[in-house]
Image (spheres, grey):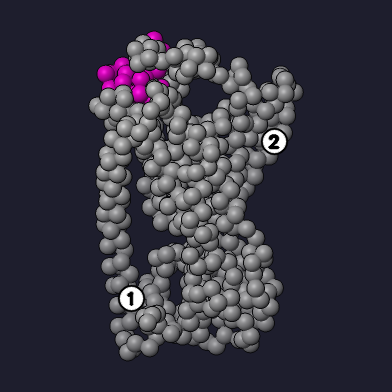
Amino acid sequence: MSNTPLSYRVLDSSSGALLASRLRPAHTHWSRLRGLLGTRALAPGDGLWLKPCRQVHMFGMRYPIDVVFLDDELRVVKTVAALQPGKMSPHVGEARSVLELPAGTLAALGVADGARLVMEDADAPPVGQSASTEARADAAAGSATQGPRRGVRFLTAIVAFVVLTALLVPLARATITWSQPSPGFICYWSAAKLLASGRSPYDLEGLKAIQTELGWDKVAEGLGFFDYLPNYYPPSLLSAVTVLLVPLGFTTARITWLVASAELLFVVGCMLRSLLPSMAGKVPMLLIPVFCLSIVSVLVGQVTALMLFAIVAVWKLLDERWDRTAGWLLAWAVIKPSLMAVLVFAILLWSGRRGRWRVVQGFVGGVVALFTVSTWLVPGWPLQLLTAMSTTSFVTATFPSIGTTWLLVLSTLGLEGWTLWSLYALLALPFLVAVARLALDVDRSLNDVIALSLLAAFLVSPPARPYDQPLLLLTLLVLVAQRPSYLHAGPHPSVSNRAR
C-alpha cells in the first residue's frame, strides 16, 4: 500500500509560518483532473498539492485562490496571489509542483520567492512549539547533504560513461568496416596534436602536414574542396576533450569519438526526461539518437552531440539551481560561437532578470579561466584564429546551397550586396528582439528561452550545415511538451503537466 499521507501540514522553514494544516495531495492524473472542481470555497488551513504541475487555470472555478509554484526541493519559485476565476496562471518551467491555497494566505504570511517549505504528515502527532525549529533543522540538513549527493551522482555518471565507452570501443573497432569513419574528427585531432606538442592549433601548415600523413584525401573526405580541414574552433570544451584523446593514437581516438558521440545522444535524451516531465519519457530518448541528422553528425565526426550535451547540461544545472557551475559550463560550451552566441546572450539575460547573478559570475569566471589557460598555452591565439579564418575559404561561401541558415538561403537565391543584407536583417533582427523580450519576461520559463534561442540561431548565424540541425530537436521537444494547456484542460483549474 502507498505510504502517502492523506493530508499534509506545510510550513515555511525560515519563519515557521503554517501555510496549510490540511493540504490534500493530488499526485495522480484523476486527482489533478478533479482538483477543486465542485467546491464553493477553500476553508482556512485547507489546500491542494498538485504534482507534477507547472501551470494552472481557473476555468469553471467560483472563487479566487493563491497559487505557489515549487521546485523539486520544495523551494518557492513563483507565487500568484488571488488568481481569479476564468484566468490562467503563467507557465513556470522551473516548477515541479503547485500549491493551491485560500486567497489571502500569501499576503497574510509574507511567503516570498526562494522560501523553502517543509511538508509534514497532518495525521502525525503534533510537535508543538518545536515545529518551526525542527522544520528549519530539516531544511538545513537537506541543503547540507544535497550538494555532496549530487557530486557523488555526477562522478558516478562520469565513471559509468568512461567504463561503457571503454567496453564499446573494441566492439566498434571490430564491427566498423569502412576505412575512414568520422572523417571530420581529423580536424580536432590534428589541432589537439599540435596543442599537445606545444604548437598553435591554428598553424595551417602544421594541420595540413598531420592530416596528409594520416591519409587525408581531398576527393574522398574533402568533397573535392578541402586540401585539409582548417581549425576554426576557439578554445572550449572541445579542446579539452580532444587533447585527452591524443594518447590513444589516431585510430583508437577516432573510434572513441564516434562511440562517445553516439552515447552522448542517448545521455541527452535521458536528461531531457526530467527537464520535460510532461512528455512521455521515451520520446526524447528515442528521437534524439535516431533522428537521421543526429546519426549523420556522428558518422561524419561532427561536434553536434557534444554541443547538445553541453546545452542540456547547462539547462539541467540551471533547473537544479547550480547557477555558478551552469555559468562556468556555459562559457566552456561555446564550441561554435556562431550557433551558440544567441543562446549564451539569452541565458545570461534570463538569469540577470531573475536576480540569479551567480550564473553571470560563473560565466565570467569560466571565460577568464579559459582565456588565461589558452593564452598561457598559445600566446596570441585570438589573432592566429582570425588569421586562419581570413586566409582559408569557408565551403559555405563557395557552395551556399549546402548550408542551413537564413543568410545562406538568400545567398543560394543569388542575392548579394545591400539586398542580401537587408533581407537578412529583416528576419534576423526581429528574432533577436523576440529572444531578448522573452528572456526579460519573468513569466516565461527557461525552456521557452532555450527553444526560441536555438531557432533564432539558424536565422542569425552566417554558417551552419545539415549536421547542425539536431540542435533544433530541443526546440521541437519544448514546443510539444509545452503545447497550450487548453488543448488538454478539463474543467478543473490545475491541468498542466501529466504524471510521468
Tell me, yes or no, whether the highlighted magenta stretch contains residue 194. Answer: yes
Give me the residue at 26% from left, 46% from top: 159
Nearer the observer, 379 or 250: 250
**Residue 299 occupies which quadrant of the picture?**
top left
Q: CA distance from mark 2 to mark 1?
A: 53 Å
Tell me, yes or no, whether the highlighted magenta stretch contains residue 209. Answer: no
Residue 422 spot, x, y in % from top left: 72, 27
Question: Which portion, as a residue range, is magenta?
Answer: 187-206
Q: Amino acid at mark 2?
A: Leu
* Image label count: 2
Q: Earlier in the sequence, mark 2 or mark 1?
A: 1
- Residue on which the image places disc 2: 427
Nearer the observer, 262 or 461: 262
- Residue on which the image places disc 1: 135
Looking at the image, residue 258 sits to the left or right of residue 391; the answer is: left
Nearer the observer, 153 or 375: 153
Give me the residue at 50% from left, 75% from top: 28
| Residue at disc 2, secondary structure | helix
Give me the residue at 55% from left, 65% from top: 497
Q: Amino acid at mark 1?
A: Ala
Residue 401 spot, x, y in % from top left: 64, 24
